[in-house]
Image (cartoon, rainbow, N blue to C red):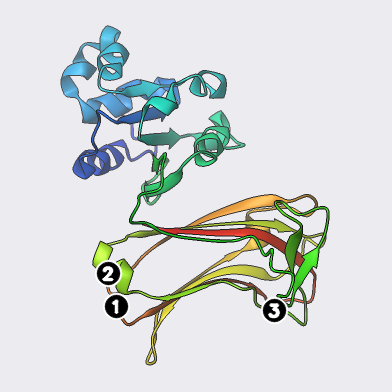
Amino acid sequence: NLNPYKGESWKEIVSYIKEKNFDMDSTIIVVSPVFQIPSFSYYYDIDAFKDYSNTAKILEKKNIYFTVNFNMFRKYKFENYKNIGLVLSQESIMDPQRKMFKFVLQKSSIVDFQEKFSGVKFYMFDTGIRQDSIYDFNSFENPDLTGNLKTEDAVTGQYVYELNANKQYSPGYKSACSDIIANKYKLINIEVWVKYSNPEINTQLVCSIENDKESVQWKNLYINKRSKPGDWQKINWFVTIPENVSANDMLKIYVWNAGQNKVLIDDLKIIIR
């Protein structure tokens, strides 16, 4: 029974997935929770929906699965697929710690996502980085770089980067957008490890596209919105590249500490695809 409307945009999210025309021979899509079989299948495959007692089995033959919980989810043979899709609803109740999302993210990168529809989210992951992707990684292991701090507590290596009242900006990524235009890249995946003790930090990840005349796009993410004081935590942030970007625009990605408190960062990774 799809009525009354329960605040979940299944028609819109399934239409979005079908319009993308993913190669389902090399893709697995997992829908959570399992009781959304009718909601998903009604819009994805009406014939499978009508054969309700066999709906799940029919869709499994098309590499679409419905999971009960994380323990069931992690048993899928994800290593057999190039792409992994997640369709998530009622996540705050069914998977409040986002275990499924984080499990896939540890082994792959997001190449497509849709979060604007009500009550349901979609993510598509690629288990390998495309050869023509732009990849940048800074582990801050250069001992001569001002701000690098030698410590036994680094995420990797021996050094981290310290931001404070006197060092507000981290080393980052800067490049013209010509490759983005040439390869029709659509998404920026930014990862960084952070550690701090004061919850009132004013530290932001910044992704800016600009030129001499104007700011084309300026996006920021407050670190303390995605992490907590204490131990090292990894932040993942995804920024959509605007359609009006030009080859001469400059892309800049960095961490900005606009406050007075100390923040440590390590392993800044950027994938543009």
The amino acid type, in three-letter code, at marker 1 is Ala
Image-quadrant location for residue 187? bottom left
Mark 1 and mark 2: Cα distance apart in space = 6 Å
Which residue lies under the disc numbered 3? 168
Q: Which residue is at the front of the view, 220 or 195? A: 195
Q: Which residue is at the front of the view, 165 or 132? A: 132
Image depth: mark 1 or mark 3 in front = 1
Residue 78 horizontal/vertical position (percent): 43, 27
Question: 10 Å neighbourhood of mark 1: few (<14), some, or many (≥20)?
Answer: few
Q: Residue, x 23% and y 18% (percent of image)?
A: 49
Q: Residue furthest top?
A: 53
Label 1 or label 3, whichever comes before in sequence order: 3
- Mark 3 and 2 residues: CB-CB less than 8 Å, in contact? no
Which residue lies under the disc numbered 1? 247
Q: Which residue is at the front of the view, 68 or 126? A: 126
Q: Residue furthest bottom?
A: 213
Q: Residue, x 74% and y 70% (percent of image)?
A: 143
| Quadrant for the C terminus in the image | bottom left
Label 1 residue SS? loop
Label 1 or label 2, whichever comes before in sequence order: 2
The amino acid type, in three-letter code, at marker 3 is Gln
Q: Residue furthest left?
A: 47
Residue 128 visible in the snapshot: yes
| Quadrant for the N terminus in the image | top left
Label 3 or label 2, whichever comes before in sequence order: 3
Image depth: mark 3 or mark 2 in front = 2
Residue 269 horizontal/vertical position (percent): 54, 58
Mark 3 and mark 2: Cα distance apart in space = 31 Å
Image-quadrant location for residue 135? bottom left
Residue 112 horizontal/vertical position (percent): 35, 48
